[in-house]
Amino acid sequence: MARFTQTFLSRNAPPRCDCEVDRGVNVELAKTRRLPDLRGFVLPALAFAIWWAVSAIHGGKGGLLVTPEQVWHTTWQQVTSGALAKALGASLAREASGFAIGTILGLALGISLGLSRLATRMIGPSFDTFKQISLFAWIPLISVWFGLGDAAKVVFLSLAALLPVAAHTCDGIHAVPRSYVEAARVFRYTRRQLVWHVILPAALPSIFTGLYLALIYSWLATLGAEYLLVAGSGIGNTLIDGSENFRMDLVLFGIVVVGVVGSLLSGLARAAERAVLKRRGGALLKENV
Amino acid sequence: MTSVVSEGVDIDRVSKHYATLPVLDGVSLRIRAGEFVSVLGASGCGKSTLLRLIAGLDTDHSGEIRVAGERVRDTSLQRGIVFQDHRLFPWLTAAQNVLAALRNAPLSLAEKRRAVAEHIALVGLEGFENAYPHELSGGMAQRVAIARGLVNRPRVLLLDEPFGALDAQTRGRLQNELQRIWQHERITMVLVTHDVDEAIYLGDRVVTMAPRPGRIERIADVNLPRPRERTDPRYVALRDELLAGFAQSPIVQP
């Protein structure tokens, strides 16, 4: 306990910030949010208009450029035939299992790196090196060991989720202000109480950042996995099919689906984060942006 | 609320170094049970360090500190402490923060809840039990911190510049509150401050410390009835005397 506490005591934390400023910012936000902000739609609308115009002039010959109608037709086909549901279902199931496995392992790794000097000394250097290796560099090894099926993909996704969760959990724990740890010492907290009631709650905003990134990374990695470990179905396979059969309508449809799912996941994660952390006030939320 | 007559604090030739830098040099002080002692000094004189040693947050020193006859070897629920930064946990409400101090107290949950309610009332924060620290003003947060420091019914309450970060009006109000609480609870209080006026207003004795290395320079008795009048000639004379002592001491290089 003493040595462990010392680890924290040697670290200093920035002073808590002033709530008045935060309230001011919130008021500003509230004002601008009264009207739905449509400015973000300008660019996509413009791109769509140009696409429409160019494809109308071009006439869809040669298949390099398809018309919005063709994409719409494909979309309709994909939705009604159940192909979209099947592909998306397969991708999301992978995403979910990879995210879950990666998060659990990432939390375990991050917490042990954050709390234990032994773990920091023993695993820390390897973990730091491991972080520098592009995930895609593991693909050949994964495909040799796990094949090209779901197992290999889930392993890849788990890796993608594990890294941000472990890194942010560890950083969040290291950034816990020593003043909190001292307060806990004054109340005679045991090590277990210190970890459970002080360190983890204090690190929660940072842990959430890690979870958020894990969700996004594992979705990106889902596409990567389906591209590079080509077997089975998934939204990535839809894209590959489109590209192999030179069906740009299918490719564009796939891209839109990937984008929409990605932003939905991101919105979901943000909403969950806000719901859990909003009561702590702006100071902590801002700290980890 | 029952009143506990507390026993005193004995500081016996305490010295401390940080590496080769002496921070405290042979500090001896005997604080009576139920006494209010102000420890006054410029920054760098080791007064906060002394308080941390009494709290048991730091045991790396020579000499001995005893509270109620027992040697300080670690932190204890018998010694509460209030820091300048309130150190409330931002993820807990005011009441939960006070309750957090009772986690290892030998009480039932119902007793703990009652103690929390009593101490929230003691610092005048009824109605703010469910407020989070960021929703409280600096003065209110410091009141919660005082409630949290007292809730274990310690023999000694250590106060490390508890009002240093507050505006003058709030500080004045909280000084009166603290005096009322001290008179009500009859426990020993040690207040570390760099505010001469605060030291005299609250202390039975004012211990002035000098820096480099930190040592006790003088101990002044404040034999004035409470609540003290800041315009009382004797008050003014003592303040001038202590301030003059400050002016003479060498400037500490940061």
Image (cartoon, rainbow, N blue to C red):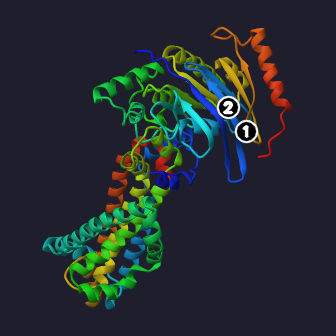
Residue A8 shows in the view: yes
Q: Earlier in the sequence, mark 2 or mark 1?
A: 2
Q: Where is the N terminus of chain B found, in terms of image quarters?
A: top left
Which of B108/B7 is in front?
B7
Checking the image for residue A95, the label placed there is: none
Residue A247 shows in the view: no
Which of B157/B65 is in front?
B65
Q: Which residue is mark 1?
A: B214
**Which secondary structure, mark 1?**
loop
Q: Position of residue A142 (x, y in %)?
A: 30, 84
**Crowd around label 1: few <14 · some 14–19 · many ≥20 (10 Å):** many
Against B140, is A176 above or below? below
Against B247, is A167 above or below? below
Which residue is found at the position 44% from the left and 46% from the top?
A: A33
User: Disc 2 to disc 1, how far (Cα)?
Assistant: 12 Å
Q: Which residue is mark 2?
A: B28
Q: Position of residue A30 (x, y in %)?
A: 46, 42
Which residue is found at the position 36% from the left and 80% from the top?
A: A55
Which of A20/B100 is in front?
B100
**Which secondary structure, mark 2?**
strand
Q: Amino acid at mark 2?
A: Ser
Which residue is found at the position 76% from the left and 38% from the top?
A: B211
Task: Write down the quadrant of residue B212 in the picture.
Answer: top right
Task: Write down the quadrant of residue B107 in the picture.
Answer: top left
Q: Chain of mark 1?
A: B
**Crowd around label 2: few <14 · some 14–19 · many ≥20 (10 Å):** some
Q: Chain of mark 2?
A: B
Task: Write down the quadrant of residue A241 in the picture.
Answer: bottom left
Against A268, is A150 above or below? below
Instruction: Count all numbered tags in the image, as a single digit.
Output: 2
Residue B116 falls left or right of residue B195: left
